[in-house]
Image: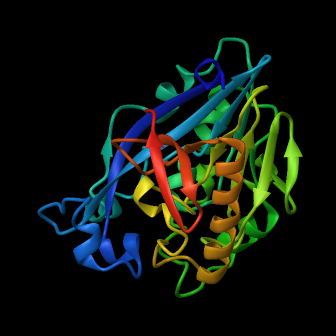
Amino acid sequence: MDWERNLKIVKTGSFSLDPGAYFGIVPRGIWQKSFNELESRRIRLSLTTAVINNSGRAYVIDTGISGHFDEKLSRIYEVFSLGNAASLIGEAIEPGSETLVVCSHLHFDHSGNCAEIVRSQHARRGAIVQEIEWRASKKLNEFTRGSYVTECGGLSRRSIFTVRGTTRVGDLSLIFTGGHSPGHQVVAFRPGHGEILYLGDLMPSRFHAKPAYITAIDVEPLVSVKMKRLLLKRAIRNGSLCIFNHDDANPAGFVRGDPDRPVIETVI
């Protein structure tokens, strides 16, 4: 697979979550073998954007936490920035490319810089999201309110391009999964041979590879398990390079073995 030519992994910073939220039903004795808690007894998560350049187009997948994030929430989530996210992401875009922004979903840690990137890169469309996800971000409940704390990085409805279900946009396949959020989607790109899969928060780190290892904030956990198992089968069958957007040490790797007992071969 010639993924190195097409794919750029851009780290824009990090934030922290309570381990109960991040690891769900996974016992402390298991996840503690792989993760160290901060002094705040939280877990640090990377903020990773995937930029795919192909034939004059650049696809920006997820945009991290806004540089204008609420000060109180920044303290709570211990947000750390590596610089202006739009600038860091812009450096990975090939000059002169037509830019499209895609969000796996609209949680604050995935959509915070959409508007700035759309403006700075003169993107032809706004952020591409599932229509049901856009609606969910506008109709919050007690369970989802804490996840949608910004309005897709300041984008208005006119700056959002919505799709319904699994579909194609340019060179990308958008695979509707639901599960983690009402309109969560996985992004697939096939650069000739092989495949790149951006798994969003169905598999935020290599630790979360097992089907039942999902976050506690998934709105439909059994859907997450079902869709993750299907995607694991696909990744094993196709030899897909998988992107783990919250994994700081190893943000990408190949899935080997059995879908119920997957082994991650890290490459980045």
Q: Is residue 228 visible?
A: yes
Q: Quadrant of residue 238?
A: top right
Q: Could you tell whether 27 is left or right of 133 in the image?
A: left
Quarter of the picture containing the N terminus is top right
Q: Going 72% across and 12% down the picture, which residue do you hit?
A: 96
Q: Going 30% across and 80% down the picture, which residue do you hit?
A: 27
Residue 77: x, y in percent? Answer: 31, 61
Q: Camera-side residue: 182 or 251?
A: 251
Q: Going 59% across and 37% down the picture, which residue do you hit?
A: 116
Colour scheme of the rendered structure: rainbow
Residue 197: x, y in percent? Answer: 65, 45
Task: Give the residue at the far left of this rendering.
Answer: 39
Residue 180: x, y in percent? Answer: 60, 71
Q: Camera-side residue: 132 or 2?
A: 2
Q: Quadrant of residue 99?
A: top right
Q: Is residue 65 visible?
A: no
Residue 15: x, y in percent? Answer: 33, 54
